[in-house]
Amino acid sequence: MSTVMFIQTGNLTAFLVGSPGTFSVATLGSAQNLGVAELSLLFVPKNSMAPDIALRYQGEFGSQYQSHQGILEISKSF
């Protein structure tokens, strides 16, 4: 889940090539300075029958903006 705060925003109308209509997009009116933190853990068991598991987190932090992503990945080699 992401939380976004817009300060000094503008609006524009956009479309995707081949899409039937348009949609509105809120834009930032000024540049944002962000710091990014990322953590990634990978578990690869010795038993090849067990799945690999990856956990990832990425956070972007600024004075007026924060974004957080969490990912759980389960994979199996055949």
Image (cartoon, grey):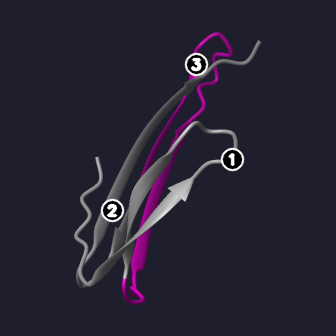
Q: Is residue 41 magenta?
A: yes
Is disc 3 in contact with disc 2, using a CB cutoff of under 8 Å? no
On the image, numbered disc 3 is attached to which residue? 51
Distance, label 3 to label 2, CA atoms, is 29 Å
The local crowd at label 1, few if under 14, some if 14 to 19, many if 20 or more residues have their Cα within 10 Å, is few
On the image, numbered disc 2 is attached to which residue? 67
Q: Position of residue 63 (x, y in %)?
A: 24, 85
Residue 41 image label: none
Magenta-highlighted residues: 29-58
Distance, label 1 to label 2, CA atoms, is 28 Å
Which of 13/2 is in front? Answer: 13
Displayed quadrant of residue 64: bottom left
Amino acid carrying mark 1 in the image:
Val
Which of 32/16 is in front? Answer: 16
Distance, label 1 to label 3, CA atoms, is 39 Å
Which of 9/65 is in front? Answer: 9
Residue 17 image label: 1
How many numbered marks are there? 3
Q: Secondary structure at mark 2?
A: strand
Q: Residue at x 39, y 81 (%)?
A: 34
Amino acid carrying mark 3 in the image:
Pro
Q: Residue at x 49, y 52 (%)?
A: 40
Is disc 1 in contact with disc 3, using a CB cutoff of under 8 Å? no
Q: Is residue 75 visible?
A: yes
Q: Position of residue 39 (x, y in %)?
A: 44, 58
Q: Nearer the viewer, mark 3 or mark 2?
A: 2
Q: Is residue 36 magenta?
A: yes
